Image: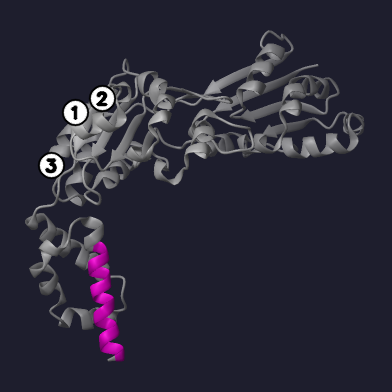
Amino acid sequence: MEGSIWVFNGPTSRFKELIEEKENTLTLNTLVTEFDRKKYEWAEDNQGMEFTLLCHGEEFSSVNEHFLGILPQLVRYLIQKNCITEVFIHNPPNLLKDKLTLEFDNDVFINFEIEQHEFPKIKADQLFDFKGKFLDEMIGQLEVLSDVLSTIYPLTSRKFNKPIVLMFYGPPGVGKTETALLLNQTLSGGALFRKQLSMFQTNEFSNYLFGGSLNTSSLAKELISRESNVILFDEFDKCPPGMYSAFYQMFDEGIFVDRNYVVDIRGAIIICTANYKNKQEIIQNIGGAIYSRFDQFIPFTELTKEEKIELITKIYDDTLQLWSEEQQALIQMSQLKHILIMNADVFTNVRNIKNGIKNAMAKYLVDDLFF
């Protein structure tokens, strides 16, 4: 009897790459269905089939904990029967990972390996790329650029593994989320991990943060499959104060633990956004325990009139491309752009400017068409 069991903790896309050429495969859900129907007769019927068993991370939410508890012994039995010869397991919960380790770690006949995905270290030239993108795409907020670069620079050192934890604070619509997106574009090859904390009510938020049953969503389950080591918690100020303790170890050590998973986020950039006005307001609302775990608090300021005019000019030209050539010609014949610039003070932020320009163009076209 010989076999191999490989456990991979990391992005879903990477796991799929590693197993994409596997043939004669069997999924965990199929195995569960067959055993519910035929029990051990299935093993007798499939003896010598030499399947590759694939256990995708998302399948564990549909498998009961009792089956996960006996899965290692079942895997051994199926290897003995030559029903399966190798097993690939993606992001197993602690219950399964611990039992697999206990069952196979010292087995001389079965090769057992656990691999933790490591995100690439940030390089200095990537920070130059971020600087260039920021200057090209952001208007204003130059002090933000300097603060961000100096705070994340330690991650270029191979000796630095602690996550960098930032709070971007200030009025809405002035570039906080956009800066996080630019960081991810230049420092990561995967999709930004982004959670909107205002979406949760207190009870469901507790289960989401601290872990509930395996068939419910959780922060840990989503973090372990993330594609990027840039993590954005939007509207962190909407997190109930009693829940901040869930972030203590994550911010301190880069380890996040809940009822079902242990997640490694060392070397990550964690960005929390909030609409606080100043540091005094921040500490009054979130308290000293979580406040002290941030590496830097970076303020985003209101747009000046000059910056609003620059944004109107840029966004106007971009928005114009949404219309047909005939509609563009009509808009360009009007005084709309001049009127918008003259009324720049009416706008409060980038989002407000985008919506204002789009609505003004649409109104002009509707008036021309119907009135």
Measured as percent of width and height from the top left, residue 41 is found at: 92, 31
* Residue at 21% across, 43% down: 170
- The earlier-in-sequence mark between 3 and 1 is 3
Q: Is residue 327 above or below residue 96?
A: below
In this figure, which residue is indicated by the disc labeled 2?
295
Farthest-out residue, bottom: 371
Q: Is residue 20 left or right of residue 109?
A: left
Query: In this picture, which residue range is highlighted in magenta?
Result: 354-370
Q: Is residue 305 left or right of residue 36?
A: left
**Could one spot residue 132 in this view of the protein?**
yes
Measured as percent of width and height from the top left, residue 249 is found at: 41, 20
Quadrant containing the C terminus is bottom left
Residue 326 falls inside the magenta stretch: no
Task: Give the CA distance from mark 2 to mark 1.
Answer: 11 Å
Task: Give the CA distance from mark 2 to mark 3.
Answer: 19 Å
Task: State yes or no: discs 2 and 1 in contact (Cβ < 8 Å).
Answer: no
Task: State yes or no: discs 3 and 1 in contact (Cβ < 8 Å).
Answer: no
In this figure, which residue is indicated by the disc labeled 3?
142
Say what secondary structure mark 2 lies in. Answer: loop
